[in-house]
Amino acid sequence: MICRKTFSLHYCVFCLGFSGVGSDKVLVMEGDSVTLNTGVQTKHQEEIKWYFNNTRIAQISGDLSFICTDVQCNEGTERFRHRLKLDHQTGSLTIMNTRNTDSGEYKLKIFSRSNSEKIFIVSVSGVSSAERDEVKTVEEGESVTLDPGVVKNPNDSMTWYFNEILIAEITGDQSKICTDVQCDERFRDRLKLDHLTGSLTIMNTRNTDSGEYTLQININNSSFSITRVKRVNVTVTAVPGSDLSSAAVAGIVVVVLLVFAAVAAAVVYCRRRIHTAVQQDEDDDGNSQPDPNGIPLKEDASLNQPQAETASKTI
């Protein structure tokens, strides 16, 4: 049966033999990634086709699949170049790094024993992810709180990274902080995670805490899921009036103490040398000993006898 142009879309779908027609509205912010779910597990018997504003952009047929391989898909503007991902197990379609030009109608057609069709109305709005990034400056020793900037839903999951190191995560009712050794060594007992809002607080900040903190938010729905990324660049500065870190100050203190100890030892050594020299120059009464060069030699008595007497003794 051929549908007339005057018939509505839903009526045409009915004529073509499709069932389960429905639509979901998906609101995303520019820069987010969104996954449109098929809700099925392919068995290589179905044929799945995706359309954007009636232009085919992806397809799975048996063991074969393609994404934007024809001119129609790119429309001469290469609209989705390297930004589409097709799940071979489910046929779900992911649009990465969304742009406002991605807004429109995405139609899913599943050809099997019972054909079905679903429509997603995607609206991309708001500022880009780059414009959502924040910069925070804090003095060393203070605390800083990183806010997700969104209202957390119970089904949402949030994951915090520091320079690509996983430091905290919330999944459902479960939360974890510092799940690896590298994180634990750097932030030991200095991270606080708000389970209700997803905000992360860094206490007693150090200059080594400076860097990029990335929050990945996964918003889950039965028909679609959205991945949102937010970045916060944190700079920890020294306390005014102190240009040296605590480690440098400790090093200087050690050097000063060593110098003081060396000077004290030198003073003690010099005093002992002086005291020893004085004891050698004085008698028990404290008087200076006589100079050996000033004592007259004893006279030999034989030298004072008359020469004649000496001669007579000889005879």
Image: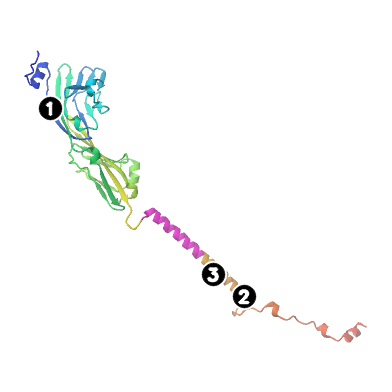
Q: Which residue is mark 2?
A: 281
Q: Around disc 1, counting alpha carbons within 10 Å, would you say few (fewer than 14), some (14 to 19), or many (20 or more)?
A: some
| As drawn, 73 above or below 172 | above
| Residue toward you, 260 or 73 | 73
Q: Which residue is mark 1?
A: 23
Which comes sooner in the sequence, label 2 or label 1? 1
Query: Where does residue 148 sit, x and y in percent of width and height?
Result: 22, 42
Which quadrant would residue 166 be assigned to in this image? top left
Query: For the residue marked with disc 1, what is the amino acid?
Result: Ser
Question: Main structural element of the magenta stretch: helix, strand or loop?
Answer: helix
Which comes sooner in the sequence, label 3 or label 1? 1
Query: For the residue marked with disc 2, what is the amino acid?
Result: Asp
Which comes sooner in the sequence, label 2 or label 3? 3
Cα distance between the residues tagged 2 and 1: 113 Å
| Residue toward you, 58 or 301 | 58
Q: What's drawn in magenta, residue-wise? A: 243-265
Helix, strand or loop at mark 3: helix
Q: Which residue is mark 3?
A: 271
Identify the image quadrant of the N terminus: top left
